Image (cartoon, helix red, strand yellow):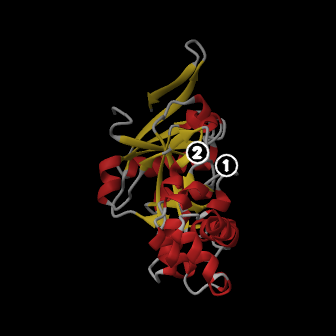
């Protein structure tokens, strides 16, 4: 089989019952942030400078029905008239800034779950860490089959800087009584330290009971089998290997073996 990043996404799994469940139940586990290993996962700083880009109508909307407006109406009127907005910016930033941003971030983090894939099936890093030292496996998912099963995915962006969010856009939505939306692009951003993973991820948004913080995530069912091949780490042994290979054979899933090629200092993928 010709495996490629163009046609496949690769998902490394450990030697445990959860791996078998995903294969047998034809599903993909999406974990909430508490189950991810990067402490900066799905994090943003808020863009304070964005406040100064708002027009006066938007500023007035934020100030509407506030105690600050009631107590400082004349001074606020003077600021608007003379275009001296710094005192107002200072109040809005102090009153809404950090608190609203933290609340928005926490609400997002508890309402989203992610499944992580990679473009690399022969990565030493991935086999050593996520492949449990060559004792795990790697699923080769067909990208078109995933899409037809309703699984959307995007490349992770790697950067030295934390992503910034214009929270005032969302504050205005709140003040207008609109549904508060959020640009989820920051959830696809990671530090360049992680760039060797070449990650692709699927995001799913939780609703109802699934939002509760104690729930670690959920399995997304697939409409059909999307696994073209199972790559078995050469050090995987015992009942799990026997079961994985037997299940793959019965379901027309190609079996490949990942081996450490010491001569060429790379991971070699061979047919079983």
Q: Quadrant of the C terminus?
A: top left
Note whether 207 is above or below 241 in the view shown.
below
Q: Residues within 10 Å of mark 2 (few under 14, many from 20)?
A: many
Task: Pinpoint residue 167: horizontal percent, then vertical percent.
Answer: 55, 64
Note whether 259 is above or below 153 in the view shown.
above
Count of numbered marks: 2
Q: Residues within 10 Å of mark 1 (few under 14, many from 20)?
A: few
Q: Quadrant of the N terminus?
A: top left
Q: Is residue 256 visible?
A: yes
Answer with the quarter of the image where residue 6 lies: top left
- At a point 45% along the width and 37% down the height, the residue shown is 119
Q: Secondary structure under badge 1?
A: loop
Q: Foreground residue, 65 or 114?
A: 65
Task: Pinpoint residue 103: horizontal percent, then vertical percent.
Answer: 64, 71
Label at residue 190: 2
Q: Secondary structure under badge 2?
A: strand
- At a point 52% along the width and 82% down the height, the residue shown is 208
Question: Are the residues flagged by discs 1 and 2 in contact, CB closer than 8 Å?
Answer: yes
- At a point 34% along the width and 62% down the height, the residue shown is 150
Note whether 155 is above or below 5 in the view shown.
below
Q: Is residue 219 visible?
A: no
Label at residue 38: 1
Left or right: 231 in relation to 5: right
Q: Foreground residue, 161 or 189?
A: 161
Alpha carbon of mark 1 to alpha carbon of mark 2: how far?
9 Å
Left or right: 102 in relation to 64: right
Q: Earlier in the sequence, mark 1 or mark 2?
A: 1
Task: Pinpoint residue 8: horizontal percent, then vertical percent.
Answer: 37, 41
Answer with the quarter of the image where residue 98 lies: bottom right
- At a point 60% along the width and 42% down the height, the residue shown is 136
Q: Foreground residue, 159 or 64?
A: 64
For marks 1 and 2, give the one nearer the viewer.
Answer: 2
């Amino acid at each position: 089989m010709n495996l490629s990043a163009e046609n496949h996404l690769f998902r490394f799994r450990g030697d445990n019952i959860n791996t078998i469940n995903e294969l047998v139940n034809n599903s993909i586990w999406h974990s909430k942030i508490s189950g991810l290993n990067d402490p900066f996962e799905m994090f943003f700083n808020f863009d304070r400078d964005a406040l100064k880009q708002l027009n006066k109508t938007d500023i007035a909307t934020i100030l509407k029905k506030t105690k600050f407006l009631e107590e400082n109406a004349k001074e606020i009127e003077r600021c608007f008239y003379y275009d001296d907005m710094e005192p107002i910016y200072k109040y809005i930033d102090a009153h809404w800034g950090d608190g609203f941003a933290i609340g928005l971030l926490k609400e997002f983090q508890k309402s989203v779950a992610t499944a992580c894939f990679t473009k690399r099936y022969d990565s030493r890093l991935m086999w050593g860490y996520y492949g449990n030292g060559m004792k795990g496996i790697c699923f080769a998912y067909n990208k078109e089959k995933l899409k037809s099963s309703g699984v959307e995915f995007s490349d992770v962006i790697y950067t030295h800087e934390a992503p910034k969010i214009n929270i005032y856009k969302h504050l205005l939505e709140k003040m207008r009584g609109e549904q508060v939306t959020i640009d989820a692009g920051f959830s696809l951003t990671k530090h360049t330290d992680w760039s060797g993973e070449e990650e692709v991820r699927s995001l799913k948004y939780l609703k109802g009971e699934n939002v509760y913080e104690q729930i670690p995530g959920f399995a997304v069912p697939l409409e059909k089998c999307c696994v073209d091949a199972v790559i078995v780490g050469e050090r995987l042994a015992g009942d799990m290997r026997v079961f994985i290979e037997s299940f793959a054979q019965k379901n027309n899933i190609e079996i490949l073996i990942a081996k450490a090629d010491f001569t060429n200092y790379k991971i070699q993928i061979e047919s079983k």
